[in-house]
Image (tube, coloured by chain):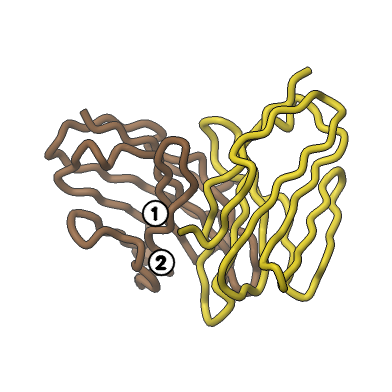
Amino acid sequence: SQQGEEDPQALSIQEGENATMNCSYKTSINNLQWYRQNSGRGLVHLILIRSNEREKHSGRLRVTLDTSKKSSSLLITASRAADTASYFCATDRGSGYSTLTFGKGTMLLVSP
Amino acid sequence: NAGVMQNPRHLVRRRGQEARLRCSPMKGHSHVYWYRQLPEEGLKFMVYLQKENIIDESGMPKERFSAEFPKEGPSILRIQQVVRGDSAAYFCASSPAQVLNTGELFFGEGSRLTVL
């Protein structure tokens, strides 16, 4: 199974509402990242949270990390149609050099 | 300030042909990663390279796939004798140092391979 697994798989909301996506992982990590992918495009880094941090903010984004539960959440406040995209969490494996492992993503649709 | 450049963006091959995908990392980046994305799926790690070295190829299929990052020029992902199951989007990412230390990966727009 995935190191990072997001839920829900798909989320449909109206503009102005908040969107919350969750990610669970299995092994210890150094940091957890969230990326965004617009349809047919590459991934764009949104935010990184380190294992010793519990919450981080960037503009309309809020990320939380609970290492005891091995889970993270991404909250997008006051969503806009332009936020429509797939959102992926990515984790490293916590030791040595590391590559990132991505989940399957949450597809967010924000309707005007 | 060019980002990660991948080409071709779209590639069509017939079964049995070879596919070569190229990736030029961001300026100043010496670490390159290749990922594969199947439709409606997340990204699957394939290989991690530094200049002239393969650091981690644990995600590469054992046959037909190879990757290199020469001293000069782009990184190349090569798929020999392509089959329909190789149809996917292949993404290259780069970082200035080990991702463990810097965190963020910078992605290209991907190369979409279609095998007929």
Disc ID at residue B74: 1
Q: Amino acid at mark 1?
A: Pro
Q: State the image quarter where residue A66 is shown.
A: bottom right
Q: In this view of the protein, which residue sits in the foreground, A103 or B109?
A: A103
| Rendered view: A20 above or below B53 | above
Query: What residue is drawn where x is 26% and y is 58%?
Result: B61
Label 2 sits on residue? B49
| Rendered view: B74 above or below B28 | above
| Apparent colour of chain A | yellow
Question: Is any part of residue A54 visible from this angle?
Answer: yes
| Rendered view: A35 above or below B33 | above
Query: What residue is drawn where x is 71% and y is 46%?
Result: A21
Question: Is any part of residue B1 visible from this angle?
Answer: no
Query: What residue is drawn where x is 84% and y is 62%?
Result: A55
Q: Which chain is brown?
A: B
* Label 1, residues with CA under 10 Å away: few <14, some 14-19, many ≥20: some
Q: Amino acid at mark 2?
A: Leu
Q: Of helix, strand and loop, which one carries label 1?
A: loop
Q: In this view of the protein, which residue sits in the foreground, B24 or B11?
A: B11
| Mark pair 2, 1: CA separation | 11 Å
* Side of B42 relative to B102 (left or right): left
Q: Residue furthest top?
A: A112
